[in-house]
Image (cartoon, rainbow, N blue to C red):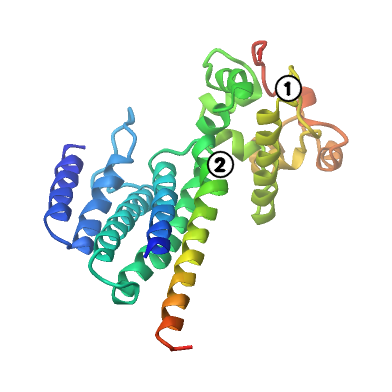
Amino acid sequence: MKTVRTAIVLAAVGIVLCLWLLVRVSWYNFVAFMLLAQPLLLLAVLIFLGAVARDLKKRGVF
Amino acid sequence: MVQAYVVLIGSLILAARAWRWIVAVILLTPSLAWAADPPRAIPKPEGWIGTTEQWTTGLGIALALLNLAVLLVAWRSLKRAETTRIMGTLLIGLVVLPVVVLFFGYNQGMSGMETVRACGDCHAMTSHVQDLRDPSSESLAATHYKNRFIREDQCYTCHSDYGMLGTVSAKMNGIRHVVRYVTGTYTFPLKIAQPYPNLRCLECHGESQKFLKSEGHPPDLRPQLISGEVSCLTCHGPAHTPKEAKR
């Protein structure tokens, strides 16, 4: 549960950075988008997938 | 513009009252697209509904807001359910929508970096952009700008090669410029890294009658212009006349 919450927070931060870029483009938010938003969103997906795999393992699916 | 705000507020109320997210996105998109339409001195033609870029921006913002709302729903649902129970919501909020939002972000970011404003964002380029926008300047760049020989993204249009690889190369140069700007590894007066290629000028002017019929461009000179042996700027320069910039 805690890991999924972490994934949600990371994704939310990443999406807020994307939103900042979509509202007004500047070098600052473009760099933030490229170097922060994308790794955060990727990390969120990996954490989520890890949590799902653990959950499935616990239920004996694999 | 008033319409835009009415629809925006209406859709936000709708989004707050119920989970009709798709309806909210549909309503949000045109309002955000209208809001992204900058005011101009020349009125738009009858039936103007904005450009594709403005609609893309509106849709991107609406989907990013939707993504945040889905994440909020997932967060609240986690209190009551296990991960697998809200798998669908999490999958949409953490995987599907972020991919779509990233796509719109790339689109917006890449095109946004081509504007004159983006070039002028770096302090080092301010004097060049001021010269470009100065109606009294006689530099080649200012002449192209004030007469709208190039309609928009004037810096990028002249400083990128044509075609797909030209865009890639220009973006790579842009990254190099950012690195040098951030690390302070540049000196005034700024100089172009490589001689300006005539082919960028000739791409637009090369087949125009004004160029072909001009006595200044006799047929025997053209091979030298194409090879770059003689620079267009020799006669048509200076390209920029920036006032002395300081760090």
Of the residues shown, which amino acid type is indicated by label 1?
Leu
For numbered disc 1, what is the local secondary structure? loop
Q: Residues within 10 Å of mark 2 (few under 14, many from 20)?
A: some
User: Could you say which quadrant of the image residue B187 lies in?
Assistant: top right
Looking at the rendered structure, the secondary structure element under dot 2 is helix
Residue B205 visible in the snapshot = no
> Which residue bears the numbered disc 1?
B190
Kind of residue at badge 2: Val
Q: Nearer the viewer, residue B115 or A54?
A: A54
For residue B104, above or below residue B112: below
Work out whether B100 lies above or below B126. Answer: below
Q: Chain of mark 1?
A: B
In percent of width and height, residue B229 lies at 88, 36
Q: Are marks 1 and 2 on the same chain?
A: no
Q: CA distance from mark 1 to mark 2?
A: 23 Å
Measured along the vertical axis of the image, is residue A1 above or below residue B140?
A: below
| Residue B79 falls left or right of residue B167 | left
Q: Residues within 10 Å of mark 1 (few under 14, many from 20)?
A: few
On the image, numbered disc 2 is attached to which residue? A31
The answer to whether residue B233 is above or below residue B28 is above
Residue extending furthest toward the front? A58
Residue B231 shows in the view: yes
Decide which of B94, B245 is in the foreground and name it.
B94
